[in-house]
Amino acid sequence: MNSQKKRKNLLQKSFLAGLVVSLSSVASAAAFQLAEVSTAGLGRSFAGQAAFADNASVVASNPALMTQFSQAQVSAGGILFSPHINIQGKIDATGQDASEKDIAPPEFVPMIYALMPINDRFSIGGGINLNYGLTTQYGENFSAGFLGGTTKLAAVNTNFSGAYRLDDHWSIGAGASVVYTKATVKRNVGALGDLLSHKLQPVKDALNNGTAEELVPALKNPTVKNKLHQELDNVFQSIGQLQPNQTLAKLSGDNISFAFNLGVSYDFNKDHRIGLAYHSPVIIHFKGQYFSDLPPVDSIINGEKTPVLNGLLEQSGHADKIKSAIVGTNGREQSGKLDLILPDYLELSGWDKLSENFTLSYSAKWTNWSRFKELHATNSETGNTLFYKKEGFKDSWRYALGATYDLNEKWTFRTGIAYDTSAAGDYHTISIPDTDRKWLSLGATYRFTPNLSLDLGYAYVQGKKTHFVEDEGQPTSATFTSSAHASLYGFHVNYSF
């Protein structure tokens, strides 16, 4: 009974460990933090977001800017993401191809905002937008499916804010948010069976040619040697039953969290303004259901059940890397919990109207990714540690410069450039191949009437080609090169009343 309990605990720890590795990809997905809060902002590469008061989307960027409006306004629309992310790679141990094209499908992100001045000093507003989002999908038979399968994360932010004008120069604002987060993570077996066979074949060869007896003297005993033969035969039989499209691990769940944001703006005069906005971290106490399609396989290298084979693996230096490579739950769900942090960020922006028609805007945005130091998963029932992994994220920066030109009362045109630095640090994954990015944007506003306008925007984003090894030093290590670019298309309708 005690042995069965230990074996069950080992299975649970190994299984959830694999899923938390997958969740590290979701955390990396946050590194693709969504700056896309408005189409007008898209047209200038989101330069000056904390200082530019062009429509009600200021609720999502800097609530202090709501004091710049003399009329109530509603702004609604969305941005279509059309990414092209390609992965070229191979599994190091076997040389199998691990390449895939267009791993991220197009996604449409809707948003809506509203604000209303209460008097000449106080304004209120609210909005719904997506501040973190990610989808990557690899084929069901992708050879590196144990590293990258399906990863989806969406954090929907519902915000309520207020702003107060202190005097002719200073305005302050604050808001509270309810953040609904939903995630799905799936990993398939891929070429894991071939990898195990590759790693175990030298053990089988050593047993057949007699060299194993030099490492494990107990094998000179025919009974022990025959038992090991039987164990290896069972292992290879179990490995042979693995299919690339089988689900190795899957997680799905959701969570409701709370956050806040603060903002301040300073008007030097009617033509020059700076703004500073802070958005708090979102702390997610994630609870989900975990399961695997694989059946429990008792003969797969378990130190409690195969002491002779385990001893041989320890002598050959492979025990720690292979001992719990495959686990399964036969589709039975298990519960676990994991705390994740979507980081806080601070943005400093400027807005300068240099002439009656021309405005320059600029921003520097810092995101506190270095607070993401570890992944620590625990069993929901016992509280015991299921997995611990140290992370190496670093703070990221975003710099943007934009120009806006008012052609006449009907038309306004925009353009902008930006540069994003990656938060990946020394950690890279094919689930989210994060990298430095360059932006080039164009946009326009057409006013049908003084109260009704339409914003249109386009941005081209070019990612830096990245070379990296995932799971370096492990039997599942693979070498990859990622390349990425994306097009973003936005529209927004604004109505003042």
Image: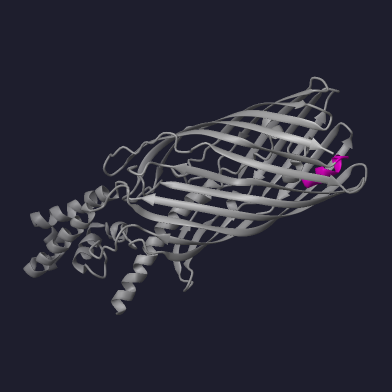
Residue at the outermost top position: 407
Q: In which quadrant of the rendered image does the N terminus lie? A: bottom left
Q: Quadrant of residue 200?
A: bottom left
390 on left or right of 394: left
The picture quadrant where one finds residue 57 is top right
Residue depicted at 52% across the width and 53% down the height: 183
Where does the C terminus fall, quadrant-wise?
top right
Residue found farthest to the bottom: 1
Predominant SS along the magenta part: helix
Left or right for 189, reference 58: left
Residue 380 locus on image (x, y percent): 49, 69
Q: Nearer the viewer, residue 426 or 1?
A: 1
Q: Is residue 53 visible?
A: no
Which region shows up in magenta?
62-71
Q: Nearer the viewer, residue 417 or 191?
A: 191
In the rendered view, does 22 fall on the left or right side of 396? left
Q: Is residue 45 left or right of residue 84?
A: right
Tell me, yes or no, if residue 434 can be seen here.
Answer: yes
Looking at this view, name the residue that lies furthest to the left: 222
| Residue nearest the viewer, comparing 198 with 66 | 66
In the image, is residue 189 above or below residue 274? below
Q: Residue at x 21, y 67 (%)?
A: 306
- Disc tally is 0
| 29 drawn magenta | no
Q: Position of residue 371 (x, y in %)?
A: 59, 54
From this view, report whether residue 380 is shown above or below residue 64.
Answer: below
Q: Which residue is found at the position 47% from the left and 42% from the top?
A: 136
Does the segment drawn in magenta span residue 69?
yes
Q: Is residue 182 above or below residue 45?
A: below
Q: Position of residue 329 (x, y in %)?
A: 34, 63
At which x and y percent is residue 253?
Answer: 51, 58
